[in-house]
Every structure is written in structure tokens, then in C-alpha cells.
Image: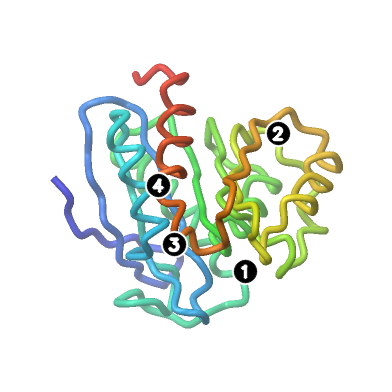
Amino acid sequence: MMVLIDIESGDVRLEGLLDKNSGQKAVVVCHPHPLYGGSMDNPVVETIVQAFKEKGYTTLQFNFRGVGNSAGVFDDGDGEQEDVQAAISKLNQEGFEHITLAGYSFGARINAQVVSNGCNIEDHIMVSPPVGFMSFDDVTSLPLTGLIVSGEHDEYAPPHLIEDHIKRWKISVQYEVIKNCDHFYSTGLGRLKGILVDYLSQVKVV
């Protein structure tokens, strides 16, 4: 059952939605840019969450600082990295040891920095990392990344730029491009969910 929880990120209280499953696999899902209407209620975020639920994961989605009922203000990505770490720690406190980090757009950008800096997770998934909108130059290594998804016509996450970054990161990753799909997945939510479910089907749920 999904419950509303508080996450303490330093002195900032964040709101989150936790849906527990009986297994030990859990995921933190991060939302798009706060200054452009992004929140944990975003349809792409919800699609990611539903895919993980279908595969037996506990899910935690939350609002970054300054969004919805989360305290604080937008911090240009710095405080938001602390928010992601706080969400991971919250799952650890709840007893979950096998954690995946997933994010869409801005959420994928923030997660990439957290992973590059080092964090306690087992898998990392990016949906439309906005390499055409935000710099990823300081993301130097993403060794835990298992899946990246983008749309064929995604102007914020152009497939050719993502491919350039994959080469720069020197990672072996499953990379899926959804045909006739833009950044907002208005016609691609079903295909996105299918890709995620197929990918997660390869992972044994504890």
C-alpha cells in the first residue's frame, strides 16, 4: 500500500510516496526539472514506478526541495543531489539493501552526478538524460548504469549525443531508442514501460 512519508535531507523535509513490497529490491525514482513543472506525479515518473511495482520492487518517489509539499527551494542541482542521497538512506533505514536509482530528465541528470560521485546502489537507469539541455561534462564515470532510454525525436536528450556520452563514459549499457517519440513520451509511455519491464525481468528479485 502506498503511504506518504517524510524524508529528512539535512534540515529540509521532503515528501515522498513509499509503496512497500515483501522482497528486498527497492527503487528511488526522481522527477523532471522543478522549474518547468516537474514533480513526482509526472506521467513518465508514474510509468517508471508502475514498471518496478510489476516486477516486485518497493518504490519510493519523492518531490525535490521546493516542489509540492517539500520544504526548501530549488538549489540548481546541488541540494537536489543531497535529496537523492537522503532518499537512498531512507530506504536503507527501512531495511532495503538492494537499491536501484532511476530518473527521468532532470532527475536522470541529478542521479548521474550522484552515481558519478559514488553511492550505495546496485543499478542505475536513466530515462531521457537531458544531454542537449544540461551539461554532463562533470559526470565522469557511470559504472553502475544498466539501462538508458530516450525517444527518437527527443530534442532535450538527442540519441546521438547520448551515444557520444556512452562512449565517453566507456560503459557497456543497454540503450533503447523509442521510435516516433519525443521528450515527453506522449505517445511512448506504453513502450517505455515495456522496455523497463523486459529489462527488470532479467533481474532476480530477492
> Disc number at residue 186?
3
Image quarter in which the N terminus is found:
top left
Q: State the image coordinates of residue 132 (x, y, percent, origin top left).
A: 74, 65
| Nearest-to-viewer mark from 3 and 2 | 3
Q: Residue at x 73, y 28 (%)?
A: 172
Give the alpha-carbon distance from disc 1 to disc 2, as whole Å. 21 Å
Q: Residue at x 27, y 25 (%)?
A: 23
In this picture, is 105 found above or below 89?
A: below
Q: Which residue is drawn at 56% across and 69% down?
A: 79
Left or right of 13, for residue 169: right
> Disc number at residue 154?
none
Give the alpha-carbon distance from disc 1 to disc 4, as whole Å. 24 Å
Give the alpha-carbon distance from disc 4 to disc 2, as whole Å. 21 Å
* Colouring method of the image: rainbow
Image quarter in which the C terminus is found:
top left
Q: What residue type is labelled 1?
A: Asp
Q: Which of 63 and 157 is in front in this view?
A: 157
Q: Label 4's element?
A: helix
Residue on which disc 1 sits = 78
Q: Residues within 10 Å of mark 4 (few under 14, many from 20)?
A: many
| Nearest-to-viewer mark from 3 and 4 | 3
Residue on which disc 4 sits = 48
| Nearest-to-viewer mark from 4 and 2 | 4
Q: Which amino acid does label 2 sit on?
A: Pro
Residue on which disc 2 sits = 143
Q: State the image coordinates of residue 114 (x, y, percent, origin top left).
A: 62, 51
Q: Label 1's element?
A: helix
Q: Do the residues labelled 1 and 4 touch (CB within 8 Å)?
A: no
In this picture, is 190 found above or below 108?
A: above
